[in-house]
């Protein structure tokens, strides 16, 4: 009997696809067996009645058993439901058709505008960051259109910046100001773990309904931990795609804290020990894996702003502290300035840009030092002046600082709908110091 006779006797309707089975179900994970998988593989879980079908990711392997974290909820599944290997790793569609669209953590459209067209291909969501020696030097300014940032915390193309603030202080409004006023050609905004109502509000109020040259990636708080985690990586992969096409890209992510909380859920459910305020070690390993992917190369740049929700306004919160050590600068928003009606409530004395001296002129840097000295003097002597313990003439430098207080306050405040061009900002900067 030859091979052709054997093949002719095979009934194609009886061929089956290899599958595994669920052996254990916990609150947010499944345990399976019967498939050869690798960590990071994507699997499809299908109920026996074929009522439920969800995607999941293999996170740990223990002998013949492996743990799956699903991308959605696991209600309705039971022991012996089938597991099929879907594909190796997680990928997302990329192309200029993404501009103006709102997508979920898997890159699928959720904006009722139909199928995404003009797609060039797929790119992996999990990537290594650029080798250090392939990174470009940050030596060109990145104007945001926000006066206090451009004057006192000037950013460079390819810089990673953190916006640190407590709840309700004004992070989202500042994000909208930067997205509207910055000079980036492409803007990628990731809203991770936020309330569902904030998505349309952010588009309507903060972006003015204008999504031109903008991609919005969302993973709301009611979605699974895996969706919230990989929403951030999806946004970064999309930004990398446009950077490698030669564009200067703005990546705005809100927030790192929700992203870390998602990984905390996953880590604790797979048996990791909590090491700092309930966060397992994988959280602190994951933050640089995400943040270090921003930067510039020979083709383009990704300038990234990551918001960090500080717990109880404590800047030494583990996530805030770790993020600050990875980023190239931090913008601190404080509640006391918000309560005074000072907006944007940027605390200049607690904030810093680590590349400012590389991207501004010597004159602007000297003006920055002068204004910082004035703010420091006012802060140090504020109580004395208020209680009347200080009399004019006792300190000429303090007298000069106090005389400029109102002009400086006017310069450092800005309406949320106002965009100030960089050259206009420099002119106002000079006048504030006169």
Image (spheres, rainbow, N blue to C red):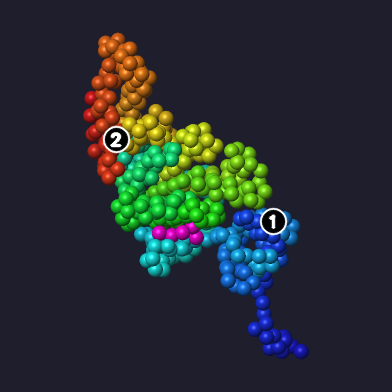
Q: Residue at x 36, y 59 (%)?
A: 100
Crowd class of label 2 (few under 14; some 14 to 19; many from 20; radius 10 Å): some
Quarter of the image that includes the C terminus:
top left
Residue annotated with mark 1 = 61
Q: Which numbered circle lies on residue 116?
A: none
Q: Residue at x 30, y 10 (%)?
A: 394
| Whole-percent x, y for residue 102 in the image | 40, 59
Q: Is residue 148 left or right of residue 90?
A: left
Crowd class of label 1 (few under 14; some 14 to 19; many from 20; radius 10 Å): some
Q: Nearer the viewer, residue 112 or 157?
A: 112
Between disc 1 and disc 2, whose residue precedes? 1
Residue annotated with mark 2 = 413
Q: Is residue 350 above or below residue 144?
A: above
Q: Nearer the viewer, residue 173 or 329?
A: 173
Q: Is residue 136 left or right of residue 371?
A: right
Q: Is residue 244 left or right of residue 47?
A: left
Q: Is residue 382 visible?
A: yes
* Between marks 1 and 2 in the image, the one whose residue lies nearer the viewer: 2
């Amino acid at each position: 009997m030859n091979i052709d006779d054997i093949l002719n006797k095979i009934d194609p309707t009886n061929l089956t696809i290899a599958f595994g089975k669920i052996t254990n179900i916990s609150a947010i994970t499944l345990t399976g067996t019967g498939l050869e998988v690798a960590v990071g593989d994507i699997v499809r879980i299908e109920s026996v009645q074929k009522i439920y079908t969800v995607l999941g990711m293999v996170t740990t392997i223990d002998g013949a058993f492996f743990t799956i974290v699903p991308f959605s909820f696991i209600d309705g599944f039971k022991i012996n439901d089938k597991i099929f290997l879907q594909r190796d790793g997680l990928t997302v569609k990329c192309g200029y058709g993404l501009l103006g669209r709102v997508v979920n953590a898997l890159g699928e459209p959720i904006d009722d505008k139909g199928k995404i067209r003009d797609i060039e291909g797929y790119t992996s969501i999990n990537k290594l960051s650029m080798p250090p020696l392939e990174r470009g030097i940050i030596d060109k300014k990145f104007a945001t259109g926000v006066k206090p940032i451009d004057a006192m915390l000037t950013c460079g193309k390819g810089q990673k910046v953190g916006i640190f603030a407590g709840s309700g202080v004004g992070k989202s409004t500042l994000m909208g100001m930067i997205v509207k006023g910055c000079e980036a050609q492409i803007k990628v905004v990731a809203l991770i773990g936020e309330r569902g109502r904030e998505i349309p509000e952010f588009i309507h109020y903060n972006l003015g309904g204008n999504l031109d040259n903008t991609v919005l990636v969302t993973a709301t708080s009611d979605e699974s931990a895996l969706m919230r985690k990989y929403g951030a990586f999806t946004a970064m992969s999309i930004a990398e795609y446009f950077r490698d096409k030669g564009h200067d890209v703005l990546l705005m992510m809100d927030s790192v804290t929700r992203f870390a909380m998602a990984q905390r859920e996953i880590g604790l459910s797979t048996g990791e020990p909590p090491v700092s305020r309930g966060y397992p070690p994988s959280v602190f390993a994951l933050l640089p894996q995400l943040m270090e992917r921003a930067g510039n190369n020979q083709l383009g740049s990704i300038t990234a702003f990551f918001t960090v929700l500080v717990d109880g306004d404590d800047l030494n919160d583990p996530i805030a502290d770790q993020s600050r050590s990875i980023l190239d600068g931090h913008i601190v928003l404080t509640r006391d300035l918000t309560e005074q009606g000072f907006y944007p409530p940027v605390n200049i004395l607690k904030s810093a840009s680590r590349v400012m001296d590389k991207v501004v002129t010597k004159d602007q840097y000297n003006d920055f030092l002068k204004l910082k000295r004035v703010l420091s003097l006012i802060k140090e002597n504020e109580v004395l002046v208020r209680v009347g313990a200080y009399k004019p003439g006792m300190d000429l430098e303090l007298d000069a600082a106090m005389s400029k207080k109102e002009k400086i306050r006017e310069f450092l405040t800005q309406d949320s709908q106002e965009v100030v061009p960089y050259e206009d900002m420099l002119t106002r900067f000079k006048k504030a110091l006169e």
